[in-house]
Amino acid sequence: MKFYNFELIFLQKKESLKKIRFFLQDFINLFFPNSCTVCGRTLIKGENVFCTFCINDLPRTRFHKQPDNPVIQLFYANPRILYGTAYFIYKKGSRFQKLIHQLKYKGCPEIGIELGKHFGNDILGSVFHSADVLVPVPLHPERFKKRGYNQSEKICEGMSVSMSIPVDFKSVIRTVNTQTQTRKNKEERHKNVESIFSIQNPEMLKNKHVLVVDDIITTGSTMLSFAEEILKIEGTKVSVAALGVAID
């Protein structure tokens, strides 16, 4: 009578399927190679969305190593906001501006996830790694429906993978569908985002250090309004982080 080690058989089949999957992916890439979203180079094994050259070429800020940096200076109006940083300098007309445009408007959420992973790796071990939870700046439901996803949520998803910090997608919502901030001055931007967020589940954020995440910081008006709403919750501390910061 034969006895079968079903666990061993399962593991062997699983390993075989994995090899087949890798073989098929390599075969597909041979004829339809993945290319870097920034420069168009063919990606090699281990690269995803971006090539190593472009990731290394990002104009990184390293602000997480500089407590008094241009990002946190935007939030001096509220001293309860502890720390601020951005992954890279965002400049109009640069190839990295086009990257953010693809993320927000061209249906490429994978860009946010992958940049989020790199951003998270960059700030590992810093004060930002002490956060208890990541909270993306929410989109209004109408804009979410039109876009199909929230780019800030995708950035958080990537950061969460690298930093092992959970993401809260639901405790704060956007109640007002504001006009675009792109062509507004600082005062207009601030007025445009007053009282546009609402806390839905304060208990989830109570007594926590919340890292608020967005795609681009310009004047900081939206993130300030969002952070101040979270700071109404008992015992909360807030820090802010964005993929890019627009510096003149």
Image (cartoon, rainbow, N blue to C red):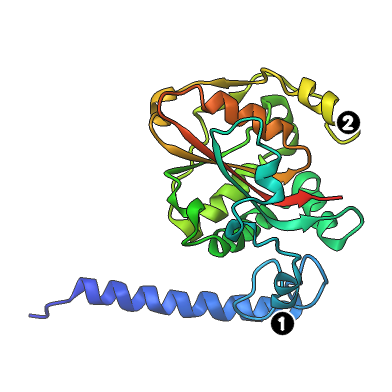
Residue nearer the viewer, 156 or 83: 83
Q: At x 27% / y 76%, what residue is drawn?
A: 9
For residue 3, side relative to residue 103 (left or right): left
x and y percentages locating residue 34 in the rendered image: 73, 72
Up-down: is 61 above or below 188? below
Give the spatial CA distance, label 2 vs label 1.
49 Å
Q: Quadrant of residue 12?
A: bottom left
Q: Secondary structure at mark 2?
A: loop
The circle on residue 241 is none
Residue 151 at least partly seen: no
Q: At x 47% / y 57%, what residue is drawn?
A: 163
N-terminal-most mark, 2 or 1? 1
The residue under label 1 is 30
Q: At x 63% / y 35%, what residue is drawn?
A: 137
x and y percentages locating residue 67 in the rendered image: 59, 52
Q: Amino acid at mark 2?
A: Asn
The residue under label 2 is 185
Outermost residue toward the left in this view: 1
Up-down: is 216 above or below 205? below
x and y percentages locating residue 123 in the rendered image: 55, 60
Q: Are marks 2 and 1 in contact (CB under 8 Å)?
A: no
Q: Amino acid at mark 1?
A: Leu
x and y percentages locating residue 84 in the rendered image: 61, 46
Number of numbered discs present?
A: 2
Q: Residues within 10 Å of mark 1 (few under 14, many from 20)?
A: few
Residue 67 at least partly seen: yes
Residue nearer the viewer, 222 or 248: 248
For residue 172, side relative to residue 243 (left or right): left
For residue 119, side relative to residue 37 (left or right): left
